[in-house]
Image (cartoon, rainbow, N blue to C red):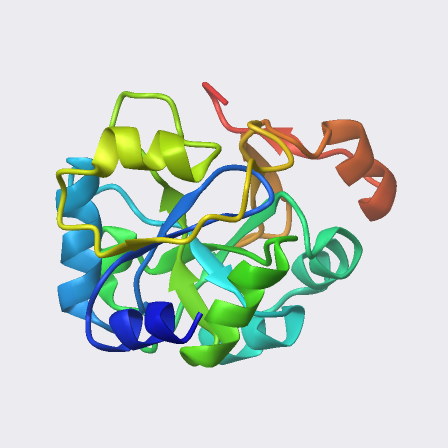
Amino acid sequence: MALAVDILLDGGVVCIPTDTVYGLASCVDNELGINKVFDIKGREFSSPLPILLASEKELLKYSPLLNPTAKRLAHFFWPGALTIVLEKNEFICDSATGGLATAGFRVPADRAARTICELVGGAVTGTSANKTGHPAATSASEALSQLGDSPLELILDGGSTLSNTASTVIDCTNDVPIILRQGAISVSSLEEVLGKEVKFNEGS
């Protein structure tokens, strides 16, 4: 764990297990590490990277506007497979979010992932560990198979992930929450917690 933290603080990238798939972690305030993530994945720089948090309380550090909807969803579903899109602040590099003023935040269920977030300041990037267009890795061996010849510095072996289903993504930047991607958290579960219907982004 200490080696992983040292690599991240030095602008490197570490592959870590989460509750869904393995993710590529870099410090959210380090342009060098963030650029390496895009390089490793072969991903367009305009595509935002999801942000993993150590805990629900860290959201206050990285998002300036927390509405009641976002707070309620975070309280009920974190740690877990729900990504909540909110406005971000200057602590997250613009390059990490493809130049967008928003970011997708999640607290993973995996304890090691949360510990790493905490030790580097509260948050890391958490995009899936794979080459763009290929299946996301659900084990250290799968990550190594795809990314072994990349600038990735370390893969933490936490065994197979609990699920290979991606997180559900919900936009909470406006009064009406909008599902951007259906995933591990069902729409009915979200509506039950919120006590109202949620809308769907076209194509989600």
Tell which of 117 and 6 is nearer to you.
Answer: 6
Q: Position of residue 64 (x, y in %)?
A: 49, 75
Q: Which residue is drawn at 84% across and 45% down?
A: 193
Q: In this view, does 13 lie to the left or right of 23?
A: left
Say how many tags the image has: 0
Q: Quadrant of residue 58?
A: bottom right
| Residue 131 seen from this side | no
Q: Is residue 104 left or right of residue 57?
A: left
Q: Where is residue 59 in the image (x, y as percent from the top left)?
A: 56, 71
41 above or below 136? below
Tell which of 108 and 204 is nearer to you.
Answer: 108
Q: Residue at x 42, y 53 (%)?
A: 156
Q: Residue at x 50, y 23 (%)?
A: 204
173 above or below 185? below
| Residue 197 seen from this side | yes
Q: In this view, does 183 lie to the left or right of 105?
A: right
Q: Position of residue 129 (x, y in %)?
A: 35, 39
